[in-house]
Amino acid sequence: MGRPERPDRARRNAIVSDRLEELWKASAAGYRARTGGKLTQFHAAREASLLDRNRRPANRRVSAWIRGDELPEAPQLLSLVRTLIRLGDLRKSVDELHPGHRIQGRLYEDHWKIWLRRAQGIRDVQGSRPRTAAAGRMDGAGVGTPLVLDRLPPQLAAEIFVGRNGRLRGTCGVLHPDRDFRGALLVVGAAGVGKTAFAVQVARRCVESRWFPGGLLFLNLQGYDAERRVDTDAALAGILPAMGTSPRHIPRTPEAKLRLYHQEAERVEAERGRMLIFADNIADPRQLAELMPPAPHVLLATSRQAHADAHGVRLVRLDALNTETSTTLITSAVRHTIGHLPRQAGNRVKLAELARLCDRLPLALRIMSALIAAEPSATIDSLIDRMADMRLRSHRTRFGDTAVDRSLSLSYEHLDPEQQRTFRLVSSHPGRHISVASCAALLDRPLHRAEDLIGELRRAHLLIMGAGPAWIRMHDLVRSFGLSLASDPEYAQEHDEATDRVLSYYEELASSVTESLGGEALPDDETLVERRAHLLSEMDRERTSAVGVIQLAARLGRHREACRLSLLMAPYFKERLRHSDWVRTAETAKEASTCVDDRTRGLTALNLGEAMWAARDFRQSVAHHRRALEILGETGGAAERAMAGIGLGSALWRLGHLCEAEQHLISAEELARESDAGIRARALAALGNVWADSGRLEDAIRCQREAANAHDLLRQRADGALARVNLASSLWRAGDHDLALKELKRGAGDLERWGDLFSYALATTSLANAHACVGMIDEALRLHREARAMFRRLGDQYGVGRASWNLGKVMELHGDAEAARSEMEIAEQLLSRYEHQHGHTVSIIRLDGGGHPADGHSH
């Protein structure tokens, strides 16, 4: 059969649309089974489908697909769709999906996602979020909670700083306590002009002068990195714990977080004094206003734009250094690196010419000084010639049109091939703060060799030491330069293999943490306890990168890996109370799961339901648990269906729907009876809580006692202790006070040994109330003070308020009216400012006398 004549454009569009529709119907069902949902295996086809400058397909087979001469196999579908969108041949169909949106010759990521999901047989894509990064690039960390330091980053604080002394003294003078400055101090200037270094010097001098007794907080908002920028919601999720707020009590909504931020700032002022918050790289003027703390606290920020319209902002503008200061910076940095100044580096005239070619920008000057230090025998003339040549070429090309680009290019050319490879791959790491251990996995090199390579890049001023010696970070301009190199098709295979390794690294770490949290480690087993503590500490440091890897896997189309890692990270998030990160990653995994099997969809819905429970959004928790139960009812095992039932029943219990909660929990207990004793114990414990609230105390006591004993038998001591504390509450309500006190003391002791400080504080509150009810006032006062101290350690201000209220009530019973009034005033101040959070399942024995503002399951 001969080749048909080439149709005109209108007929060609119709042919393409018909072919795609036919292909979708024929292959959507078998696509996932055949490919496992791994989009990365289409890399070769994707590369083949790139267009040449004449906007024609660069591959004959792709041309045949577009003409309709051949019908592609299912694995080739994504390449075809990408090519068609690039050519603009699907305008009509895309307009039908999104009226008003038109493709104008380039790939719009939101349209690509629509067609990608459509090709995979997914319905209802109208609400899909647009892609935030180009497919096939390992260059994004999403919007996870950032790392917030209570000190300045070590290397930034130790950097050589020359010039600008007059400006520095004037800026510090503004922040002197006698000036009573209120608002934000914004350091603005071009990229690479030294804004962060200047602001660090300001912060260092202020801290050393003890002008901010409330402390200093530092975070990098990465506002000019499209993939790593931190929004205000994520920034507050990082700032609040650093201010002393328990992660358990950080609200989910941005408005509530902002309100709590102002409340905590007032508390810090009352307890310690004014505080300095250092926010590096703000791009959005709204963030400047939102993060501005109440007086007398001060926000010190850096930005490339002058947000002069923001209220309460004072600008400090920085320009390029003068010639003399520029040459001094070069010579000082060289001398600091190698201990002396090479003879050829002493020619101030030649150094002035080199500084001119660097536009006298500190970042470019530091890179040049690193090159001089690396080759002391090389002449300054050679650097000048190479920089001048690059400057000339930059006028003819799009790349290298800034001094920083040119200095980076020169520095990169100076590296050996392995160092160049290291730079390209580390630039692609999804984390904001990068561990050397993860770099070793990324590079596929032993740790000691990775340390050597990273050390070379640090000496070249391409990498910066992070929060500690084993951590690094990158200037956003340097990372952007590295990503431009890594995107070269020549390094595509290298890039994909590195992606596999970094995903494996975080999966192995998350698996180890999850295994250590499995309940087998007893508090008196020092080896296992130490190992668990070590793994948790390691994951604490890797948390932001792990969140970034999940976002990365979803963007690269590695949906199964994104779901798996999200599920593995859930026990860690639960243990460390990182509810914001848990919800974000669970939502990412739920979206990714639409491209894999039904069982994974059910598990990710279950995970999201549990995350919403932890975040105290019980209505959303019910919705996601219902969805999980529906999906797992067809594809999941009995244990998985039981877990979904427990989650649904517990969320319904929190909403007061006791009858429906009871039905789901009974079904869950029956499912788990033959499949998993631990899950059955959880179902019994939850059912006991529901029956206790329903007034069926005898049934509640039976379920809770059986659950506590089962957990103890399975060495799940933490769960057993919680079940025992709830059992004590039911026994107390049934009138068996002696046995209730016995069980309560045992459960509280187990919680203390296990290290669950929050649950132990609640159990101590319950124990104090019980002692007060039987007339043991002195013991009740001691226990309430102990509980208040624990809540204060946790940063739970609502808990502190509740403990103060309880103390006042007990003092009232004791007849000490004046002390009681003082405690109640403290309690009223705290309880009026902080919201009641219900994120626990501990039942509390209540004080007699009524007036308790909390429900029966809170403190």
Image (tube, rainbow, N blue to C red):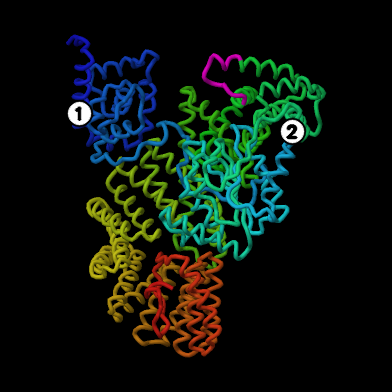
Q: Which stretch appears magenta? A: 392-403
Q: Is residue 396 magenta?
A: yes
Work out how far the residue at label 2 is from the one at label 1, CA to CA, in angstroms: 63 Å
Q: Main secondary structure of the magenta part?
A: loop
Task: Give the percent coordinates (x, y) of residue 101.
Answer: 29, 30
Secondary element at tag 1: helix
Task: Give the percent coordinates (x, y) of residue 687.
Answer: 30, 71
Residue 394: image tag: none
Residue type at mark 1 is Glu
Left or right position of 89 against 823: left
- Residue at the spot of label 2: 333
Q: What residue is at 65 percent from the left and 25 percent from the top?
A: 359
- Residue at the spot of label 1: 21
| 241 vs 626, nearest the viewer | 241
Nearer the camera: disc 2 or disc 1: 2
Task: Give the percent coordinates (x, y) of residue 111.
Answer: 31, 31
